[in-house]
Amino acid sequence: MITPFLLYIGRVSLYLAIFYAFFMLVMRKTSFFRLNRAALLLGTVACHVLPFLRLRTVLMTETAVPQMVVAEPELVGVAAPEAPQAPGIPWLTLLYAAGVLTVVALVLVSVWRTLRLIHAGESRDCDGFRLTLVDRDIPSFSWCRHVVMNRSDYERYPAILRHELQHIRHAHSLDILLMTGVNAIHWFNPLAWLARTELALLHEYEADEGLIQQGIDATQYQLLLVRKAVGEQRFSMANGFNHAKLKQRIAMMHTEKTPARVRLAYVGVLPLLVATMFVCNPVRARILSVPEEAPASEASSAPSLQKPVKTVPFSQVTVKPRFQGGDANTFAKWVSANLVYPTEAKNDKISGRVLVQFTISSDGSVKDVKILRGVHPQLDAEAVRVISSSPQWKPGEVDGEIVAVTYQFPVIFQLRDTPASAATSSEEVVPFNQLEKRPTFQGGDMNSFSKWVSENIVYPKEAFENRISGVVTAQFSIDTDGSLADIRILRGSGNESLNAEALRVLSSSPKWEPAYSDGKPARVTIQFPIFFQVRESNENPISTK
């Protein structure tokens, strides 16, 4: 599973690849050493910020070719929570973490070698820096305000010390530290490693230029570079005298200055990055479709179903909304604790199930609370009141982006001395939120049953040909032996063939593992909506059986 963090890293890596490729092809051979260095650093930081800027395109689509969607089941009780799923092993996350840890380990080894070498040498404080002389044959290097040199080089070649002081003057060590972090995060991106090499080469160009501007003889300095060209690169975190490519450094000293107008080439990378932002950010589709026809008996009780949904359905979010650190079960308990049974309805023994729809907005507040299917004005009003008074949620996310989420939530008003309306046997129906163990289907949860229904349902031929869509809301009980009983249509689609197919597939269900309450098998009633929907497509998504 790709987590939001890995998705963010992937997007940043794509931006970096585009920017670094542009730099390698266009700017790497120019003589703008300071500009190129600043561009590499600022561009790297900018590529890590771009994924937070959300650019969207809006597509318009229309409807026609059948597609069936089995919605998340709604469980009779105070809420319709989604059953928790056992998390799988995040292999992709583990692989990424292993790469990061490997790079960090190599960096720590480099730091340890550098510190051990400094500790073994003779150190002295000089004017603005600290010099360490060692008797080993190593290439000279600098780190922060510390210069490490072979004693022989210090005595024979003062130009080497002046070169390392140029690195200290321009704070090249901070650049290396930043790029080391980038390499650790984007260890899988080869262009990130090439960018580090190019940055180190820019450091050498800048140091060489500064030294020549101080009056050193360029020919003698180039001969010194050739003489000291052989060395080992143990200290990857440091700026070394021999770390960069010798041929390129000498060639750059003889290269004519690049015309100033070439600096404008950096403007050319902006359209590439903006285009990539449009590609990487999700497309918001606006569906233009004719609302499904509801039965006449339901038209007055569910007018909101005729309005197109502008937010993300609960079943399509990648990160579900959270309530007070928990899931929908936590919200169900909160509703149960704050719900007040209206006195008049209680005296008249009025009970029933109020189906409420609301939106968990991007700031976590509950908005647009409405009744999809009511029971009694007093019960409906109380359901709206308690849900409208909900504390803030942690909003849901789709591909790392915070979105508004629509949620359907059944509130049950049931008097204790009133038998369960879904039960036809003498067994008591236990509310879902009071179960010790939830029912399971073929080792999985309700999502497994939804998948089984999708695989075994057949779109009726007549409805298919006439492009008839609809929603069939069925209700059934999972008995104490795991069999399905009392299967019925609570709200039909307006087409008998769709209703009949929904009943057929539910009636053919294999046995479940029953629920348990107080250590005993318990009977549970579930409401299960099945969507028959027709959409425009080049391929028929229905598998015929």
Image: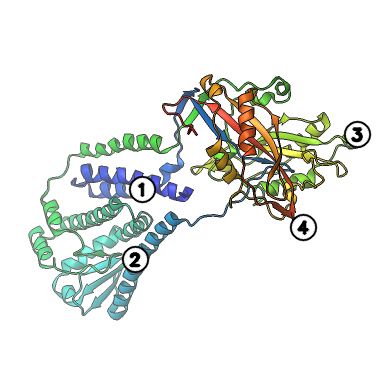
Q: Residues within 10 Å of mark 4 (few under 14, many from 20)?
A: few
Q: Residues within 10 Å of mark 3 (few under 14, many from 20)?
A: few
State which mark lies toward you, 3 or 1: 3
Task: Using the rendered view, name the quadrant where residue 157 is placed.
Answer: bottom left
- State if disc 4 and disc 3 touch (CB < 8 Å): no
Mark 4 is on which residue type? Asp
SS state under label 3 = loop
Above or below, 14 relative to 436: above
Tell me which residue sits at (67%, 34%) in the image.
Answer: 474
Front position in the image: 86 or 264: 86
The residue indicated by pointer 2 is 107
State which mark lies toward you, 1 or 4: 4
SS state under label 2 = helix
**Gap between marks 2 and 3, in whole Å?**
76 Å
**Gap between marks 1 and 2, in whole Å?**
21 Å
Task: Using the rendered view, name the quadrant where residue 232 is placed.
Answer: bottom left
Q: Residue 516: percent from the left, percent from the top?
A: 72, 54
State which mark lies toward you, 4 or 2: 4
The residue indicated by pointer 3 is 348
Above or below, 379 relative to 112: above
Task: Using the rendered view, name the quadrant where residue 356 is placed.
Answer: top right
Badge 2 or badge 3: first in the primary sequence: 2
Badge 3 or badge 4: first in the primary sequence: 3
Badge 1 or badge 4: first in the primary sequence: 1
Tell me which residue sits at (22%, 55%) in the image.
Answer: 201
Q: Residue 417: percent from the left, percent from the top?
A: 88, 43
Tell me which residue sits at (84%, 41%) in the image.
Answer: 419
The residue indicated by pointer 1 is 13
